[in-house]
Image (tube, helix red, strand yellow):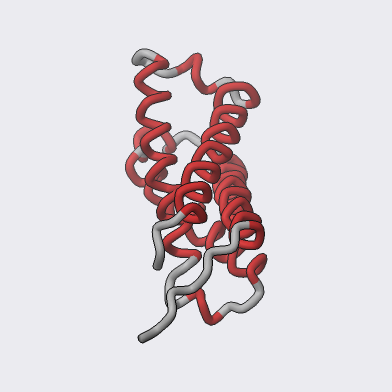
Amino acid sequence: MKFGLRFFLSWLLASVVMFVLFYLWHGVFLNDFKRIQFPLLWLEVFAAFTYLILGAAIYFLFESHLLKHVKNLFLRGVICGIVLGFTIFMVASIVNISLTRHLSMQHLMIDSVWQMAEQVVGSMVVVVLKLVIHEPMAERA
């Protein structure tokens, strides 16, 4: 895997898009930020780093040897987003078990679907940039 323009733009743009979606979902639509017990800046900084890591993970999974077998780039992006979105949802639910114990199954399912949709959108950024940015393959000796 080459760490060129395609990697860095895909990584950063996917991370920013997913962070904006996170902020809109939790900050505007659900209004969750009013309930946090620590400064909002901490949440924003932690979320920014989390989404930078997640953006890189999406790119690496998308370009992984396992997913290279899926030739349709859009299908590969959807698979990548669903896998990472569901994984993040499971980890977040387990880590926050004391906060999620009073939530209904409907709430958890909606949260799960949203998390997967958010990561699918991030994966689609990677797909679009893969199609738009051409990086020549290195010649083999």
Seen from the viewer's position, the closer of residues 7 and 80 is 7
- Residue 115 in the image, given as x and y percentages of width and height: 55, 46
Q: Tell me if I can see residue 131 in this picture.
A: yes
At x 50%, y 74%, the residue is 67
At x 35%, y 20%, the residue is 42
Seen from the viewer's position, the closer of residues 114 and 134 is 134
At x 65%, y 56%, the residue is 128
- Residue 83 in the image, given as x and y percentages of width and height: 50, 61
4 relative position to 118: left or right? left
Where on the picture, by quarter, is residue 126?
bottom right
- Residue 91 in the image, given as x and y percentages of width and height: 37, 49
User: Residue reaching furthest bottom?
Assistant: 141
121 relative position to 45: left or right? right
Seen from the viewer's position, the closer of residues 116 and 47 is 47
Q: Tell me if I can see residue 112 in this picture.
A: no
79 relative position to 74: left or right? left
Seen from the viewer's position, the closer of residues 73 and 94 is 73
- Residue 59 in the image, given as x and y percentages of width and height: 47, 58
129 relative position to 9: left or right? right
